[in-house]
Amino acid sequence: MSRFATAGLAAALAGLALAARALAVEPPAPAEPAPRRHERGSGIEDDGRIPRPQRPADLPNPDRWRYLPEGRIPAGNFFERFLVTSVAAPAVFKSSDAGWGGGLGIGDLDFRGQRRRENLAVYGTYSEEKQQSYGFAWRRWLHQRELPEGGVLQEERSFVQASASYSRTRTRRFFGIGPRSRKDADPANGVPGETRFTDENVSVELGSEVAWPDPGDPLVLSGRLALDLHELSGGLGSDPDTKDPMLGYPQLFGEAEHQDVVWARSGLRYDTRDSQRNPYGGFHVGARAEGGVLLHGSELVGRLTLDASWVVPLPGLLHTGDPDEENPSTDTFFLGWRTTLASGDLPFTLLPDLGGPDSLRGFVTGRFRDDASWFGRAEYRVWVLERGLGLKPPFRIERIGVAGFYELGSVGSSGIDLFESRVQHSYGASLIASIERAFPFRADLAFSKDGMRLTAGLGLSF
């Protein structure tokens, strides 16, 4: 067992210990009346519509609390709640580089029977070429209110969380540094082109976000501590002549091969959006500062990220909406912007980058890297099936929609250099299926000068 595999197991155990400690030191919540237990499905009509409940008069910022009806908080163990608040999803896949593989993801939205105040996800995958990943993520919401008629209200801006993961990804791609990096080699000008490498990574993080001074307030403070360990080696799927990344980029890979970082992260944002994970209106502006220490050499490094978004509700294209519904169908137009600046001698794996499911989706992950980056996006989302699909009871897809998007961005050697760097473009369409407002799944078909890419994941991309 490699030192990183051993470290991965230790990281998972350490992360669980941190989560347990966070639970142990949390101050006791004020006494609440015993919640009323309602019949399964209470609060949800036969067609999936959820009537909007009356908010308590003393609830601060009432429109920023998410309502969970009794039908989404069934009692019982993991198996009795299966496909409502618990799920086990096996997977089988095949990659031209990593071969056949399989995995299992287990999620519990009501971990420890806390009326959905805690959730836990655990996953693992393995392929015949020894590409693998394992990890867990845990979160506890800090503000929750029981309703006399059943169900709960949950404020989603304030939480504590912990995670740990180990991965060995053998198909990472690297194209060099700067906005003009290219896929094809150009030996005459000393450009190695694309190469692939293995990134063995251990990550552990403990953090929290809090709306201040009252739950749901627009000012949100965040803080996190993280350990990020990387070990690089040759990858799969490259040309035999360039399979070893040291041949193409010996200095960059030599500097990054064993670089490990301890991070301290803090953030501040002003956020008027009505939801943090699927907003229908509002805006946010924020900043996140990250300070780190490279464990090999004790050098100080840092990153600063500034971001903003604006969401505009639009008249329904294929529906009328219902103001008396808790989560009415709402078409939206979205604008988002983000820029990141790095300081210190960061290894290339930790430089600001563009490409992948969350930025410039038409390019592979990490397609462009440098000391600074910026990224912008416009997206128009339309709900097509207002009442979704009722599958095998009690499982239901609440809503199905589509989106069209256009993205652009660039990287540069400094913030000033960004103004002169070549701009990259990506565009495409998404299919969105939401089992409830906070859990949208999406599949993106994106195009760029590098071709077409299909990606999928949980949550929106910005």
Image (cartoon, rainbow, N blue to C red):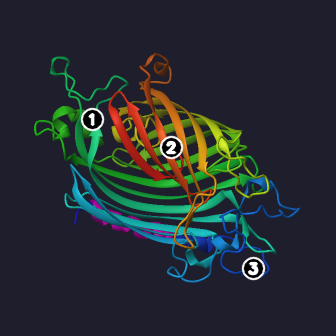
Q: Going by the picture, which residue comes out furthest to the left?
A: 240
Q: Quadrant of residue 60?
A: bottom right
Question: Taking 413 as reference, is 432 left or right?
Answer: right
Secondary structure of residue under mark 3? loop
Q: Position of residue 35 (x, y in %)?
A: 75, 79
Q: Position of residue 326 (x, y in %)?
A: 73, 58
Secondary structure of residue under mark 2? strand
Q: Looking at this view, is 217 or 49 the one in front?
A: 49
The magenta segment is: 4-18
Which residue lies under the disc numbered 2? 291
Residue shown at 47% from the left, 22% from the top = 418
Establish if 269 lies above or below 28. above
Which residue lies under the disc numbered 3? 35
Residue shown at 41% from the left, 19% from the top = 422
Q: Looking at this view, is 133 or 49 the one in front?
A: 49
Q: Earlier in the sequence, mark 3 or mark 1?
A: 3
Secondary structure of residue under mark 1? helix
User: Quadrant of the image for the C terminus?
Assistant: top right
Residue shown at 66% from the left, 74% from the top = 41
Question: Taking 227 as reference, is 276 left or right?
Answer: right
